[in-house]
Image: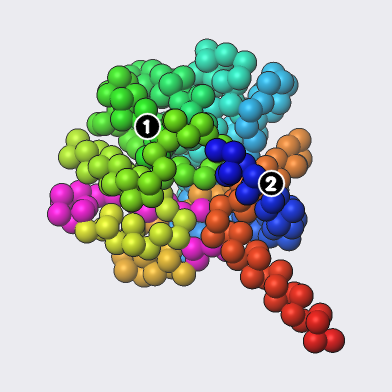
Amino acid sequence: MGLTMSWDRILYPLDLIGCNLLGRHFVGAFNVNDVLDVGRDLKRQGFGVTYNLLGEHVTDDKDVRMAVRTTIDLISKMDNSSLGNVSCKPTLYGLNISRETCFTNLSILVRLAVEKDIEIEIDAESSHYIRDTFEIFSRLASKGYNQYVRQAVQAHLKETFSLMDDFNMWDKNLRIVKGSDVYQEDESMIVKDPLAVRERYLEILVRNIKNGRRPFAATVRDIDLARKVIEISAKEKGQFEFQTLYGPVGKRMRRCLLSEGHPVRIYSPFTDTWCKDAWRPYSMRRTRINTMRKMILGEFLNYLKFFSRR
């Protein structure tokens, strides 16, 4: 843990450079109308879309109300050309205030989702929030909204499987993510071996398909994992959907998968005027991931080489 944190501190200036130079490229738009235009463009290309209002760990009730209002505006303005799912981070919708506040707010959004025949995808945040998040999801699913809610589950968290057992989630709509490197977690809480994380990811996929569901298999650029998902789904005679992130990383992979006839959905983050700086922490997380650090370092070295020749 100490070594990892020291390494993160060493790379922090690089992360800041990456955030400021490239961070905005990971954000679809900076208001509702523009992100719906992004959705229309993605759908014209053949992709599905999931919209995600950025922001998390909110403790101010006013900001929570603004998040709900912005998401209502987003859903209300969707038409057939921009129709897509909506991903919600529980701590943006009131989980830091109370579990009941979050449940009430997400219930409002789910009822709107039913009218539009779309899903509310409940995101997974750090391990501190997972039990409460799964409890909220299970309550929504049990109230007749099963086909309109989907829960993200993180393969790298050790407690994921036991919590999914506790809340009877194997036959529910799932979005499967590896989860590694997204949030700083105590090492005792996570599976560190990348191969073990992948095996857990694929086990969730198999069990969800065997329970008659159509999981979303999320990956940014892991083409080997994507090929394994295709292979397993064919073997199990099940359906699935790939989900990737909006931005410059993984473009070739998602176009390749789409051209092969696989359904690909793009997770499209956005902000609004009241939360205009919410893109920064999100972009910092994206640039902290090793593949992005390598890309940023490469661009920075090319920049230095260019000026050294002048």
Q: CA distance from mark 1 to mark 2?
A: 26 Å
Q: Secondary structure at mark 2?
A: helix
Q: Which residue is mark 1?
A: 158
Q: Amino acid at mark 2?
A: Arg
Where residue 115 appears, x then y in whole percent? 44, 32
Residue 120 part of the magenta segment? no
State left or right for residue 222 relative to residue 32. Answer: left
**127 or 105, which lies in front?**
127
* Res. 187 visible in picture: yes
Residue 235 part of the magenta segment? yes
State left or right for residue 154 relative to residue 210. Answer: right
What colour-coding does the image apply?
Answer: rainbow
Residue drawn at (45%, 42%) of the image: 179
Q: Which residue is mark 2?
A: 9
* Res. 109 visible in picture: no
Quick one: quadrant of the N terminus? top right
User: Quarter-wise, where is residue 276 in the image?
Assistant: top right
Specify the farthest residue to the front.
3
Q: Is residue 127 above or below residue 238?
A: above
Where residue 156 appears, x then y in whole percent? 40, 39
Quick one: quadrant of the C terminus? bottom right
Where residue 94 appears, x then y in whole percent? 60, 21
Residue drawn at (27%, 58%) of the image: 228
Residue drawn at (58%, 26%) of the image: 91
What is the magenta range? 232-251
Where residue 125 appears, x then y in whole percent? 52, 33
Q: Secondary structure at mark 1?
A: loop
Q: Amino acid at mark 1?
A: Lys
Residue drawn at (65%, 44%) of the image: 6
Q: Is residue 149 above or below residue 271?
A: above
